[in-house]
Image (cartoon, rainbow, N blue to C red):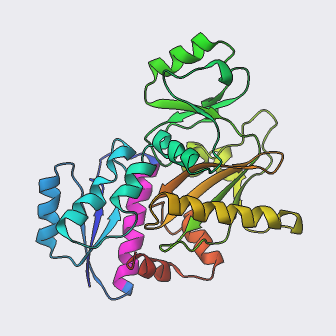
Amino acid sequence: MKVLILTDSRKSIMSEDEADTLAQVKAVKKALLRLGHTVEVAAFSLNLNLTARRIEKSGCDFVFNLVENLSSSRLLHLVPLLCQTLSIPYSGGDAYTLSVTGDKVVAKKQLNLGGLPTPLWLERGGDCSSFLSFPLMVKPIAQEASVGITDASVRTFTDAGELSSYLDEHPDLFAECYIDGREFNLSILPGGRVLPVCEMCFVDYPADKVKIVGYEAKWQEQSFAYQHTKRSYTFGIDDQGLVEELRRLAKAVYELFGNSGYARVDVRVDQQKKPFILEMNSNPCIAADSGFIAAASQAGMTYCEVIELLLRR
C-alpha cells in the first residue's frame, strides 16, 4: 500500500512539541517501511486546494495524519474533512471527533450534556462568583500538547472583577476548578479498546509545587517536572475499583466524541477518589517514547503492531 504521511510544514526554529512531531514522522515512516508499505511525506497547508493537489499527486491509498501544530486545535478537523472529501482513507479521528475535542470548552459542554463528570468551568462573560477563593486551572481553549500550561496556570482569585477582567483580557483562555489529587491517562485504540491505565506520579514534588502535567513535564527534559513525573501501571487491591471506573469512563468519553480513531483520555481523581474528566486528546502523540506507545507496550504490542492497527482505523 502507498501511504502518504501528512504532517506540519517544517520550521527553521521549532519548539519541543513541534520537534516531537518530526520524531513521530520518522518513527511512523520507519515502521511503515518495515511493514512493507511505500511511504511519502508531504506538508499540510491551510490552502486546502494546494493540500488536495499534494494528496492526489502522491497517488496514495491512505493518508497517515500527523498534523499536530496548527495555530489552533480548532483547525485540526480540516485534515480528515479534506480526506473524506477526496474519498481517501486516513488514520485517526474523523472530522467530527477532532472538531469537538479541538475546542476544550465545547468538549466540556458535551461531557456535561452526556452526564460525564468534568470539573466546573468558567468562560469569558460567565458568572465569576462561584469560582472565587479556591484554585483554578486557567488554560488555553484551543491548544494541545500542554502548550500554555505552566505552574502559574493554577491560581486563585478572590475578587470577581479581577477574574472577569483576566478572562476578558485573555479571550483564548478559560478557567476550570483545579482538582487537587492524582492524574491518570487512558489510551484507546481504534474501535474503543482501552489500553492499561497509566498514573502520572509526581515523585518528590515540593509541597509548594502544583502537581500538574504541564508543558515542562511533557517536553523539557532538563526540568524538574520532566524528571520527576513518572508513569506507573501498577495498582494495589484498593485501587482496582477505581481503575475499572476509569476504564468505563474512558470508553464512554470515546463513544460520546464519535467513536473514531485513537485517543487518550486525561482524568484527575480527587482526595475522595472521585474522577473528573479533563479532556480527550484525539490523535495523541505516537512517538516511540510517548505515553500511548508505552501503554500499548504494557499490553504486549510492538511499535509496528500499533502502526499497523492504526492503518485499519
Q: Is residue 103 left or right of 226 when viewed as pictured?
A: left
| Magenta stretch in the rendered image | 17-33
Q: Which residue is found at the position 61% from the left and 54% from the top?
A: 266
Residue 290 position (above or below residue 220): below
Looking at the picture, tell me which residue is in the foreground, 93 or 31. Answer: 93
- Tell me which secondary structure the magenta stretch mostly adopts: helix
Quadrant into which the C terminus falls: bottom left
Tell me which corner region of the image, top left, top right, bottom left or bottom right, holds residue 6.
Answer: bottom left
Residue 118 position (above or below residue 189): above
Residue 306 position (above or below residue 188): below
Looking at the picture, tell me which residue is in the foreground, 21 or 282. Answer: 282
Quadrant into which the N terminus falls: bottom left
Instruction: Report the number of discs.
Output: 0
Looking at the picture, tell me which residue is in the foreground, 218 or 307. Answer: 307
Residue 266 position (above or below residue 85): above
Q: Measured from the top left, where is residue 56 in percent x and y?
A: 13, 69
Query: Does residue 221 appear in this view?
Result: no
Q: Measured from the top left, where is residue 164 in percent x and y?
A: 54, 16
Q: Residue furthest bottom?
A: 36
Query: Does residue 247 appear in this view?
Result: yes
Residue 22 drawn in magenta: yes
Q: Measured from the top left, where is residue 182 in percent x and y?
A: 75, 50
Q: Which residue is found at the position 33% from the left and 89% from the top?
A: 36
Q: Which residue is found at the position 88% from the left and 64% from the top?
A: 238
Tell me which corner region of the image, top left, top right, bottom left or bottom right, holds residue 5.
Answer: bottom left
Q: Measured from the top left, where is residue 262 in percent x and y?
A: 47, 67
Q: Which residue is found at the position 88% from the left and 69% from the top?
A: 237
Residue 212 drawn in magenta: no
Q: Is residue 305 left or right of 88 when viewed as pictured?
A: right
